[in-house]
Amino acid sequence: MATISTPENADPERIVPCRLHVVDENFVPTFGLRVVAGRNLSERSKEQDSVVLNETLAEDLGWTPQYAVGQTLRWNNRKQVTVVPA
């Protein structure tokens, strides 16, 4: 189990436990998922620290899916990653 938080967040109640899966650009089409904001991962994403969130995690962080796009997150209170931008 991993934790995700916003870097500026000092509120321990906003540290959200979540499951983290390492996937590539084939995950979304393979499982027939729909991207509601931003875009799917791409070859370019592999070179960056990029993540795709589901709507539930965005809401748990107090964000709409549209607001989440481009935001920076802290994974396990260490590594910073960016929600895939449009």
Image: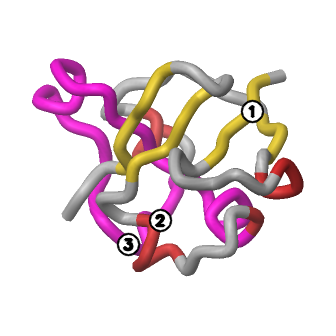
Residue 69 position (above or below residue 36): above
The local secondary structure at tag 2 comes to loop
Q: Amino acid at mark 1?
A: Thr
Residue 13 position (above or below residue 74): below
Quarter of the figure with residue 31: top right
Q: Is residue 34 shown in magenta?
A: yes
Q: Amino acid at mark 2?
A: Arg
Mark seen at residue 3: 1
Residue span colored magenta: 32-59
**Residue underneath mark 2:** 34
Residue 34: x and y in percent read 47, 65
Mark seen at residue 37: 3
The structure residue drawn at horizontal position 21% and vertical position 26%, both measured from the top left corner, is 48
Which sits in the foreground, 73 or 25?
A: 73
The structure residue drawn at horizontal position 33% and vertical position 35%, both measured from the top left corner, is 50
Q: Is residue 85 left or right of residue 64?
A: left
Label 2 packing within 10 angstroms: few (<14), some (14-19), many (20+): few
The structure residue drawn at horizontal position 67% and vertical position 23%, both measured from the top left corner, is 76
Residue 30: x and y in percent read 47, 38
